[in-house]
Amino acid sequence: MKLLILLAALISSHHVSATLELDSADLSSLKTLNLEGYLSFHDTHLASRDFGDCYHSLPSAILRPKSPQDIAKTLQHVFDLGPSKLTIAARGHAHSLRGQAQAPHGIVVNMESLADPKKRRVHEGGKSPYVEVSGGELWIDVLRQTLKCGLAPRSWTDYLHLTVGGTLSNAGISGQAFRYGPQISNVYQLEVVTGKGEVVNCSAQKNADLFHAVLGGLGQFGIITKARIALEPAPEMVKWIRVLYSDFSLFTKDQELLISLEKGFDYVEGFVIINRNGILNNWRSSFFTPENPIQASRFNSNGRTLYCLEIAKNFDFNNANATDQEVESLLAQLSFIPSTLFSSELPYLDFLDRVHASEVKLRAQGLWEVPHPWLNLLIPQSTIHDFAEEIFGKLLTDSSNGPILIYPLNKEKWDNRTSAVTPNEDIFYLVAFLSSSTVDSLEHSLSQNRRILEFCEKQGIGMKQYLPHYTTKSEWAAHFSHRWQEFVRRKAAYDPLAILAPGQRIFPKANAFA
Ligand SMILES: Cc1cc2nc3c(=O)[nH]c(=O)nc-3n(C[C@H](O)[C@H](O)[C@H](O)COP(=O)(O)OP(=O)(O)OC[C@H]3O[C@@H](n4cnc5c(N)ncnc54)[C@H](O)[C@@H]3O)c2cc1C
Ligand SMILES: *[C@@H]1O[C@H](CO)[C@@H](O)[C@H](O)[C@H]1NC(C)=O
Ligand SMILES: *[C@@H]1O[C@H](CO)[C@@H](O)[C@H](O)[C@H]1NC(C)=O
Ligand SMILES: *[C@@H]1O[C@H](CO)[C@@H](O)[C@H](O)[C@H]1NC(C)=O
């Protein structure tokens, strides 16, 4: 029995759909559950893929819940079975990169079945407006709902076709996080189904340990069925600006200035352009450059690595002129290459949903459902220059496979009681290598990622992976570092049988009985 489990773990970590069968008694016992939604056993291939497209594990069943109680009943049932092989993974929009929302032989919970427009509640009153939604809602739908009341969440991801529960299980980072913190810093309350099948409401005041465990918790402690998300008045329009630098130090100096300002820009990101032939106009329309590509014909990089600062200022029609003046005086403090200012104005919703426009185009070209060997790193301010010098232009000589994002974040906006881990410096950078691959070039991309990670290790860069992917317990322990004991304690408290989110490969279920 132990051997079989070991074999299953080995097989699933090598990209092969495993063929081992579960105990059929465990499976058929599921059919006795009295649910508002339903379990299905015939269409499990629908839950074996994700955006990364590198791992494909078949579950034994898919749960399409109609209520949090459906999830609780299923979890309780599996918990009561005790030492079975059954695991359960919440599946948001499956935009994971390495099978994190998969459950080899287990049950995948299709969280989007919980989404329900009638159950999205906006509370406008008071100083702290919020919206309460199901964990399976897409952020784009949350935004559309709250905009009807002139409100919007404050902290975002670059792409909104992700679920609330999925991004809150990681962190949720974008160009607003320098000011508001990641999405996990903007939640008032959660309803969670724990690994024992208990439905618990939690917040920083009530069941605080569970609340903080679940935020950034990689799905290890419970399934988020509801979330109360902080709102602010929504601006009408956005002024979206890009400027170029050829000097990395000037680029990061300006980025760091902008994230220190109370009343500066409302969004600060950036990306790296590595293009040896110097001509930028065949720079592929990566999906982070939808309607507003750099007007390349006007600028030649002469083979230099370029850094593009991307910033935005929110405004309403009635203060457009004042905003123009503010933007001008902010830009005057920056050191970009003067001839490289590109700007446009667009409605707030179109700005936030900008990546979706590119998704539509890429889908039409068959370039969306391809392997995505992405690598996301959080790099301390003190080593970002060493990192950049080795990686941008030397180790990586071309950025045409996909965007390379880079922007700084303020650690003080992260709550250190949550499960998310970051470098231990006041400022750290998100560096995201977002390549698209073909099946043939996948191995090359993965080995490039390995070389980047090896460099970080060798040079003591002090990096933390974001959307972390490890396969051994000692790597996970190193990732969580001084927080590891706490992570293990929380696991024992909230999911003692290690039923939840097996695709993260942190606590193999078999080991729960070792
Ligand atoms: C195009 C694209 C752009 C992105 N941009 C950003 C970005 O700008 N910033 C950023 O921070 N991230 C970004 N991401 C990463 C994204 O946040 C993660 O991939 C996230 O996991 C995707 O959310 P999902 O809803 O698809 O979750 P899934 O991939 O379905 O799940 C992720 C993990 O969370 C668990 N989980 C899912 N739902 C729940 C729940 N309700 N309760 C508990 N656990 C749950 C799953 O079991 C799994 O382990 C991007 C991803 C893509 C594909
Ligand atoms: C949790 O709170 C929500 C309202 O925020 C309520 O609808 C739900 O019933 C509560 N759940 C529990 C288990 O108390
Ligand atoms: C903004 O400036 C333009 C000219 O620069 C002017 O025509 C317009 O009336 C101004 N709008 C407001 C709201 O002040
Ligand atoms: C979190 O931060 C507070 C204050 O900034 C500090 O006192 C505390 O020790 C930190 N906790 C952990 C777990 O790092």
Image (cartoon, rainbow, N blue to C red):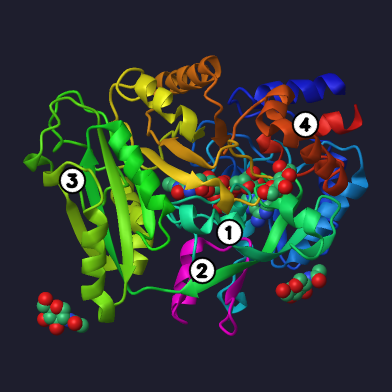
Q: Residue 164: which numbered mark, if any?
A: 1
According to the picture, the residue beneath numbered tag 3 turns out to be 294
The mark nearer the N terminus, 1 or 2, is 2
Residue 42 visible here: no
Q: Amino acid at mark 4?
A: Pro
Query: Relative to residue 183, is residue 73 drawn left or right?
Result: right
Counting from the top left corner in percent of width and height, residue 451 is at 46, 17
Pick out the residue farthest to the left: 298
Q: Residue at x 42, y 74 (%)?
A: 234
According to the picture, the residue beneath numbered tag 2 turns out to be 142
Label 1 element class: helix
Q: Which residues are magenta?
A: 123-152
Find out whether the residues at labels 4 and 3 contact each other: C-beta distance under 8 Å.
Answer: no
Q: Nearer the viewer, mark 3 or mark 1?
A: 3
Q: Nearer the viewer, mark 1 or mark 4?
A: 1
Q: CA distance from mark 1 to mark 4?
A: 26 Å
Q: CA distance from mark 3 to mark 2?
A: 31 Å
Q: Amino acid at mark 1?
A: Val
The mark nearer the N terminus, 3 or 2, is 2
